[in-house]
Image (spheres, rainbow, N blue to C red):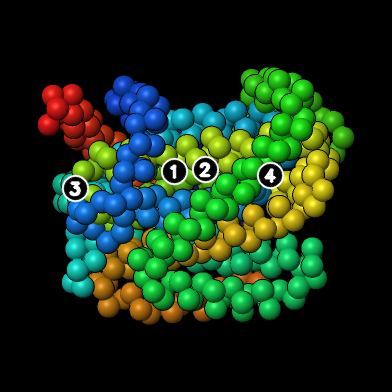
Amino acid sequence: MTAVITTVNEWAWGPLMLLLLLGTGVFLTLGLRFMPIRKIPAALQLLMRGRKSQAEGDISPFGALMTALSATVGTGNIAGVATAIALGGPGALFWMWMTALFGMATKYAEAVLAVRFRERDERGNYSGGPMYYIRNGLHKRWHWLGVAFAIFGSLAGFGIANTVQSNSVSQVLHDTFSVPPLATGLVLMVLVGAVVLGGVRRIAVVASWLVPFMALAYTLAGLFVILSNATEVPAAFATIITGAFTPTAATGGFAGATVWAALRFGVARGIFSNEAGLGSAPIAHAAARTSQPVQQGMIAMLGTFIDTLVICTITGLVIVITDVWPSGISGASLTSSAFTSALLGGEYVVVGGLCLFAFTTMIGWSFYGERCMVFLFGAGAVKPFRVAWVLAVPLGTVFHLDTVWLLADTLNALMALPNLVALLLLGPLVFRITREYFDSASRGH
């Protein structure tokens, strides 16, 4: 079973997939004439104004971004960056940046289409995302892709955003404080249940408080390390940029890495962290109180900016500056070792960050899975899905998860495929909607 999944996974995340993900981002960026990069300040202004939106929808535009970020900012920001550097060398961080710059256009297009083609379920709640923009925006012959996305989306979360997350938390708490894994699982189950069973409004409220706090606390700790070693920063950037275009030599416990390894692990971990192209975030943005797809798209693209260009960069710089990356260790342990070497109690920053990031990922992704189930089976599927989601949490702390991780990673790639096809086919519509919005804004309407 593991051998079969490994083979499928290598194909699913192979050169073709990475090319498709990056290529879609480049196509959309060019079609939008670099608007996502040019309009970052305007998007930040919109985000602040959108907190009090009175338009139709279930949650505020700010709440939608925080819900999407709660699912996006996760173990990928702490463990994923470290894994990319451990396998591809410091140059992997450069390719994570490239993925994010082009990924902003992908995330923008996803949210524009999600708001444009969203629907209301029989209970009056908004539903949207790739399955809806495939069904409502594309010809009948493509509709099976929407069903495929919903099936992969409803299953993928149980791995990548549920059991894998509770496993990471239980492991780190066991290693640092000797907490029994099952105890961690049961406490997490109660906490996740208290939020998830309240639906998207409760998820958005919790995410709106927790995400800014945890992102800011982690960023400040990282900035403190970077500023304390300010003289090392130019050399760190030089190492990262050189490593992106020349092979990294073997040193210490680091086995050496080719340019392809830096590119492959940088892109794959970048996508895993910011989820641009996977089609998950637009499900949250479809619930926003907005009548303007372009405005929500601009708010959505900030998710990729915050996740990769801010939080992942902080993790990567701390690892490169403290020079722990050639040690041969990987994942959260590498990040922990970097913070510990530069900051008194640095390991607690990583433990705290990992626990909070994992918890918010679990609550954010539960909404994604739930909307996929609504698309497949109607609103009656919501309650059974939420209960199953909560009950699955402690399982991750007691099982060996290598196969689950592989399977979830593969399902993630299979989610991305229908979404990327839809983005390429609906790209011209996104360009037209965007052009019309900015033309009308410039005329003062």
Residue at horizontal 41%, vertical 63%? 205
Separation of residues labelled 4 and 3 (CA atoms) = 38 Å
Separation of residues labelled 4 and 1 (CA atoms) = 20 Å
Instruction: From the image, state whether disc 2 or disc 3 is nearer to you.
Output: 3
Separation of residues labelled 2 and 1 (CA atoms) = 6 Å
Instruction: From the image, state whether disc 4 or disc 3 is nearer to you.
Output: 4
Q: Write down the residue under mark 3.
A: 291
Mark 2 touches mark 1? (CB < 8 Å)? yes
Residue at horizontal 71%, vertical 33%? 226
Q: Which mark is residue 221?
A: 4
Q: Which mark is residue 303?
A: 1
Q: Tell me if I can see residue 142 in this picture.
A: no
Residue at horizontal 21%, vertical 73%? 123
Residue type at the position of mark 1:
Gly
Q: Quadrant of residue 284?
A: bottom left
**Disc 1, SS:** helix
Instruction: From the image, state whether disc 2 or disc 4 is nearer to you.
Output: 4
